[in-house]
Amino acid sequence: MKKIIDYLLSLLYAIHFGVTLLVFHVIQVVAYKIFGPKAHKKSVDYLNFSLNFGLYLTGASITFRQSEPLPDHRPIIFIANHQSMFDISALFWFLRKYHPRFVSKIELAHGIPSISYNLRKSKAAIIDRKDGKKALVEIARLGKLIHDEKSAAVIFPEGTRTASGNMKTFQPGGVATLLKRAPDALIVPVAINGTGKMNPKGLFPLRSFTNLSWTVLPGIEPTGKNLDDVLSEAHEAIRKELKFH
């Protein structure tokens, strides 16, 4: 019976997901071309609101926690574990105040309504994993952008999704490059829990009635510290939070 419910609710969300991408693709294009980047950013906020809270259609519970206030006029590098594609819409929405841009693989930059357009127009770091040199140049560009704007970057330093929740070692390259161009940035770990359990096989079927949570943990000052130590501290903070839940 549970499997039947999973399929029915997954179908309902899949329809919502597809319609949302198509509708907001048009909204984004109009917003960007007629009203400019600020209007485009607002449209992307509500795109991700719809994608995230549409998960209520599957019976999911959605929880966001923030351990402490974050600075408004300082670049932030959010470091998160990565369980599934559903990690991203919640981070966009809940962290929208900080204008987050993602480090994203190049395959997502074309062919996906709404998502591809936003990646290209929002000045996200779009990287080709087969070309490490160009990837670092692109991440460095993002680092300078968040430094100049006092905005935020989001990076998944595991380098791939780990749906099981068993985190992989954080790779230093991307974070190091961001910090070189934004040396005054605050490192902020984010623990994501439940999204991998919800979709172990991709978009369909989803597991209904899954508990999902995003927890912003206390920031880590990187100044004067070895980067490996900073990443180890962030990794351990996220691991403890996941274990707690």
Image: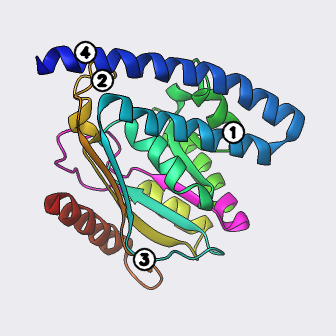
The mark nearer the N terminus, 2 or 1, is 1
Task: Point out the residue furthest to the left here.
Answer: 1
Residue sitting at 87 percent across and 39 percent down?
Answer: 35
**Marks 1/4: CA–CA distance:** 30 Å
Q: Which residue is mark 3?
A: 68
Q: Which residue is mark 4?
A: 7
Residue sitting at 28 percent across and 72 percent down?
Answer: 233
The mark nearer the N terminus, 2 or 4, is 4
Q: Quick check: 24 above or below 223?
A: above
**Marks 1/3: CA–CA distance:** 27 Å
Front of the two marks 3 and 2:
3
Residue 159 in the magenta stretch? The answer is yes
In the shown orientation, is residue 178 left or right of residue 42? left
Could you say where residue 145 lies in the image, as x and y percent from the top left?
69, 58
On residue 171, which mark appears? none
Q: Quick check: 196 above or below 178?
A: above
Label 4's element? helix
* Among the 4 quarters of the image, the one containing residue 244: bottom left
Look at the image and give the residue range highlighted in magenta. 145-171
Residue type at mark 4 is Tyr
Could you say where residue 229 lies in the image, as x and y percent from the top left?
30, 74
On residue 202, which mark appears? 2
Q: Residues within 10 Å of mark 2 (few under 14, many from 20)?
A: few
Front of the two marks 2 and 1:
1
Residue type at mark 3 is Glu
Label 3's element? loop
The mark nearer the N terminus, 3 or 4, is 4
Q: Which residue is mark 1?
A: 43
Residue type at mark 2 is Gly
